[in-house]
Image (cartoon, rainbow, N blue to C red):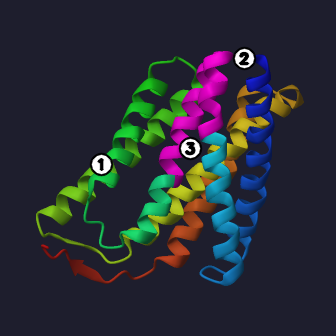
Amino acid sequence: METLHQSMLVVHILSGAAALIGGALAMTARKGGGTHRIAGRVFFYGMLGVSFTAVPMTLIHPSTFLLLIAGFSLYQVLNGERALRNKAQRPQWKDWTITALGAISGVAMLTTGNVVLMVFGGIAAVNVTVDLRTYVSVLRGRRVPGNTWLRKHIGHMMGGYIAASTAFLVQNASGLGPWWLVWLAPTFIGVPLLVMWTRRFTRRPPAVTAQNG
């Protein structure tokens, strides 16, 4: 079992490095361009590698923090990727499954008593609420902003990157200052950037009416 854990750890670290580098490149590259798309794929698959290796690792060496961050990260990147493929935001079983993952992760985080996990749990709760409101609006044929998918893509991909950065700092930089400051630094930096980019790239959205079918 220890050999399996070490093997998973190697894949976990390599996937994390790919995700951090790919995510940074995707954020700084021209949005929608070739570099952004390629780097975004590297980030996405790197995050999948991080999340899926975390599960067997926590079964061998239990770590509530690692498991919940993995679940939260998986919810974020799956939702961000799904937004590109479901621009109309008409929910299918994949969307409900992803939202359920976010709800489970969020509730679990909120009950830990850990400040950092509770912050992420609160973020997950807001995200899930927005998911559900959007899906219900679409199913009822109400008008929704035409750039909802873009807001969702930016927000969730950035949320996944913040989670990955937090996990990296927790493992490698906890001694550099007050633990809460080190752990929450990616959130303090990432959220203002998220707000700025969302406003910049989603100005003056056209309203659209969801069509049945």
Q: Secondary structure at mark 3?
A: helix
Residue 187 in view, yes or no = no
Residue nearest the observer in this picture, 200 or 23: 23
Figure check: 175 above or below 97: above
Is residue 66 magenta-colored? yes
Tally of numbered tags: 3
Q: Where is residue 170, by image quadrant?
A: top right
In the drawing, what numbered circle is on residue 12? none
Q: Which residues are magenta?
A: 52-77
In the drawing, what numbered circle is on residue 1? 2
Residue 3 in view, yes or no = yes
**Residue behind mark 1:** 96
Question: Identity of the amino acid at label 3?
Answer: Ser
**Mark 2 / mark 3, whichever is N-terminal:** 2
Q: Identify the residue at image location x=58%, y=67%.
A: 196
Tell whether label 1 touches label 2 (CB within 8 Å).
no
Measured in 3D between alpha carbons, the distance from the residue under mark 2 to the one under mark 1, in whole angstroms, is: 34 Å
Image coordinates of residue 166 in percent, x first then y, are: 70, 39
Q: Secondary structure at mark 2?
A: loop
Image coordinates of residue 199 in percent, x first then y, are: 51, 72
Which mark's residue is nearer the viewer, 2 or 3?
2
Tell whether label 3 touches label 2 (CB within 8 Å).
no
Q: Secondary structure at mark 1?
A: helix
Question: Identity of the amino acid at label 2?
Answer: Met
In the drawing, what numbered circle is on residue 73? 3
Q: Where is residue 171, by image quadrant?
A: top right
Measured in 3D between alpha carbons, the distance from the residue under mark 2 to the one under mark 3, in whole angstroms, is: 25 Å
* Mark 3: few/some/many CA within 10 Å (<14, 14-19, 20+): many
**Mark 1 / mark 3, whichever is N-terminal:** 3
Tell whether label 3 touches label 1 (CB within 8 Å).
no
